[in-house]
Amino acid sequence: MQSSATFAHNRNAYEPETSIRMFHAERPAEAADQAHLAHSLQFPPSAEESALRLISVSKAFGNHSVLDNISLDVPKGSIHGIIGKSGAGKTTLIRIAGLLETPDSGTVLYEGINVPLHQLRGKDLLAARRKAGFVFQNFNLFASRSAAGNIAFPLEAAGWPKPRIRNRVHELLELVGLADKAGRPASRLSGGEKQRVAIARAIAHHPSILFSDEATSALDPETTRSVLDLILNLRDTLGLTVVMVTHQMEVVRRICDSVSVIAGGSIVEEGIVSNVFAHPRTHAAKALIEEASHD
Amino acid sequence: MTEILNLVARPLGETLLMIAASTLVAGCSGGLAGILLFALSNEHFAGRHPWARFAKKLADRAINMLRSFPYIILMVLVLPLSRLIVGTSLGTVAAIVPLSIAAIPFFARIVESALSEIDNGIIDAAVACAASKIRIIVAILLPEALPSLVSGLTLTMISLLGYSAMAGVIGGGGLGDLAIRYGYQRFRGDVMAVAVVTIIILVELIQFSGSAIARKLRARR
């Protein structure tokens, strides 16, 4: 189940001419891709090479077991996909990893914090949360705030002084290509713009891990591509580790380095994306790949 | 007509004082109580602790009990409390105490439901931004709920206006008292009509401004 190999990604699915590149001015599409190809990682990583570790995590709601003894190590600086059918437990998994939910048992560790994160309280818990950013399917922007106000919130929470917040928000709006929409109320942005604001908000406080729960599921294919390119670019430029839950195999194929296939609350298969795609061993993985090839 | 207007002036002032003071008290303490009720039941706040569920049940009982009291009986029951708080159990100032007590649970429920209506995803996002619980409430949840809170406060003020008509029972005066004393007891239909029309105008004014503010807040989004 856990084969170790070097990343050498097949990017046949990539179509530069149809994708929107937000960074084409300073980063040609090919450069981003080559940087990605040059990326060489081991999966599964050693404990020291992991940005995120889940050890024997279980969770049940009432009598219904959602996650059953899940362990996962995500390599630093990689984009790791968690894929499965709806109801497989992937959202619960990422919510536990992102400290939005508490597991019934098991341990979550981030690089640099040697304490099981769910034992933390108060300021320590907030400090651990600052190591992570979270992007949601429905964007979850604060309607009472502008685009800039949304991005400023984690910085206000971290106690940054106002001028520094202003500069950082400006920098982030530029980064996600929305400098002209700073004052716009969150609800008056398009879907793609909302998700870009949400991504800027999630990385504002310099987290080392970005969690994405179906971030592109509510977007059309073209906007999906531009958001995925943005995430890829952030990983390449900032060295972020990205963990993304999705039910779209296409998303995994497009930007993930490694993938875990989850079914019935367990990880049934995992490895480097090209390997899993080329030689799926479980029924769940085969079904997902089959489904993707019909789309 | 001047005579009638002179008759109305003082009770109008009394009514306005009673509404303003009790709205202020209920807005602050009812608001706080509403936030606590919400925090006791929401998973991201105290909701996951068994003690919170227990406390919430107790608070629900207390609020329901307070809200089911017929107002006129509540008014008599809190007489000793009025004496304790404002030093007298008679008059306009004394009438503010039962009005506030009736409005606190009412507004608390409104605040609780306004906060509960906020999408859970918004709270997830605020939590993921590594904000403290208090900051999430003050900087995100209350602003998110603001239009509903304004509508709810409008509703509270209008029902307070209704309750304040009974203030006459403890010598609180006000427009309702004027209408009963002159219209009902002295057969002065004209005075009663003016008093009632004044109350209607007050209701309209409160409703109009409340709706306008709430609309403006919503339009900015």
Image (cartoon, rainbow, N blue to C red):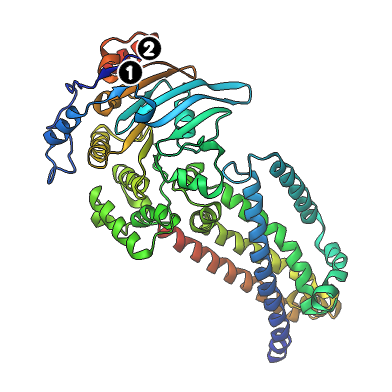
The residue under label 2 is A1
Q: Is residue A23 left or right of residue A157?
A: left
Residue B163 shows in this picture: no
Foreground of the two, B30 or A93: A93
Asked if residue A120 is positioned above or below residue B190 in the image, the reply reads above
Q: How many numbered circles does the render carry?
A: 2
**Label 1 element class:** strand
Residue drawn where x is 78% and y is 73% of the image: B95
Point out residue B91 in the picture as x, y percentages from the top left corner. 81, 79
Quadrant in the picture for the N terminus of chain A? top left
The residue under label 1 is A271
Q: Is residue B157 left or right of residue A124?
A: right
Q: Amino acid at mark 2?
A: Met
- Tag 1 and tag 2, C-beta contact below 8 Å: yes
Neighbour class for label 2 at 10 Å: few (<14), some, many (≥20)? Answer: few
Q: Amino acid at mark 1?
A: Gly
Point out residue A64 in the picture as x, y percentages from the top left corner. 59, 21
Point out residue B172 in the picture as x, y percentages from the top left corner. 80, 77
Write down the chain letter for disc 1: A
Write down the chain letter for disc 2: A
Quadrant in the picture for the C terminus of chain A? top left
